[in-house]
Amino acid sequence: SYDELKKCTNNFSDSNEIGSGGYGKVYRGMLTGGQVVAIKRAQQGSMQGGLEFKTEIELLSRVHHKNLVGLVGFCFEQGEQMLVYEFMPNGTLRESLSGRSGIHLDWKRRLRIAIGSARGLAYLHELADPPIIHRDVKSTNILLDENLTAKVADFGLSKLVSDSEKGHVSTQLKGTLGYLDPEYYMTQQLTEKSDVYSFGVVMLELITAKQPIEKGKYIVREVRMAMDKNDEEHYGLGVLIDPAIRNMTNLIGFGRFLELAMQCVEESAADRPTMSEIVKALETILQNDG
Ligand code: ADP
């Protein structure tokens, strides 16, 4: 109930606030059984919030996968809307890549994070019934649990896709700048391949640790230009590689990982792999590590 949730976060005190997003503030709390949770509290009086709230509950109650952040419960009382999730103690992938969380992600860990998130998304695309397009895949929506296992979060923008709807023109463009599929941007035709594009951008973040747009430069374009130069060292990527992994002598499957990322961000959706093809390719890369 609302009162219980209020208690478990100490009356939503600022000290328990762990973040805020488009939907509202997020608090850390502990349920009476001892389970640590993240509580998303909607901004007061936002119609948008109301709609997203219902959408998110409907989606999450149907969706269970080890690489998707699980919904523990919800509350819709006393004018408050709240979603209770399992708590991800190691924060977002973006925080780790930017060095803010103090967690060092070595290359092998990055491969595992890529596979985990890809599995979560492949599940949404191919096994959820009906299929779900996430629509806002990005490094701040990939959370890390206590074992640094990746879990995809934030289905507020997700869209259930029935066959009749698939490929239809949507009226409102959704997503985050820098991750946005250019073909979707042009045609507004929503398909799973838009998630694949965004995921490709995340893969480039895993290589470079850069944000998708930094100082007006797009990571996708920067990497493409560097690869065109094609000098010996890592396809000319040299200075673009994250310093935290640049000195590792053996980046297993680096070349193939990079190729896969570039396939994901192909201009034409038809040239991009599906999410489950990505999972298979990543698994092959990691297996060759022995
Ligand atoms: P946005 O709407 O910008 O995607 P969210 O509202 O989903 O952001 O979350 C805001 C922030 O709260 C996240 O960046 C993250 O730091 C934190 N957060 C969200 N969900 C969880 C969770 N389940 N466990 C731990 N931290 C979380």
Image (cartoon, rainbow, N blue to C red):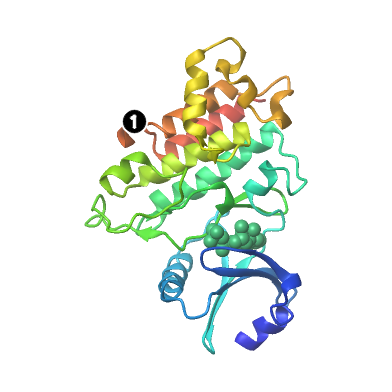
Question: What percent of the width, then of the height, locates residue 188?
Answer: 28, 49
Residue at mark 1: 271
Q: Residue at x 70, y 20 (%)?
A: 250
Would you say residue 30 is visible in this rendering? yes
Left or right: 236 as drawn, with respect to 37: left
**Around disc 1, counting alpha carbons within 10 Å, would you say few (fewer than 14), some (14 to 19), or many (20 or more)?**
few
Q: Residue at x 41, y 69 (%)?
A: 55
Give ligand 1's quarter of the image: bottom right
Please tell me whether mark 1 sits on a helix, a strand or a loop.
helix
Left or right: 226 as drawn, with respect to 187: right
Question: What percent of the width, then of the height, locates residue 6?
Answer: 67, 83
Judged from this view, the residue extending furthest toward the top is 232
275 up-or-down from 15: above or below: above
Q: Residue at x 67, y 59 (%)?
A: 88
Q: Of the residues shown, which amino acid type is indicated by label 1? A: Asp
Judged from this view, the residue extending furthest toward the front is 215
Question: What percent of the width, then of the height, locates residue 62?
Answer: 45, 65
Q: Nearer the viewer, residue 55 or 62?
A: 55
Would you say residue 149 is visible in this rendering? no
How many marks do you count on the picture?
A: 1
Left or right: 169 as drawn, with respect to 242: left
154 up-or-down from 232: above or below: below
Q: Quadrant of residue 206?
A: top right
Q: Residue at x 73, y 43 (%)?
A: 99
Q: Does ligand 1 reach within 8 Å of label 1's beta carbon?
A: no
65 up-or-down from 212: above or below: below
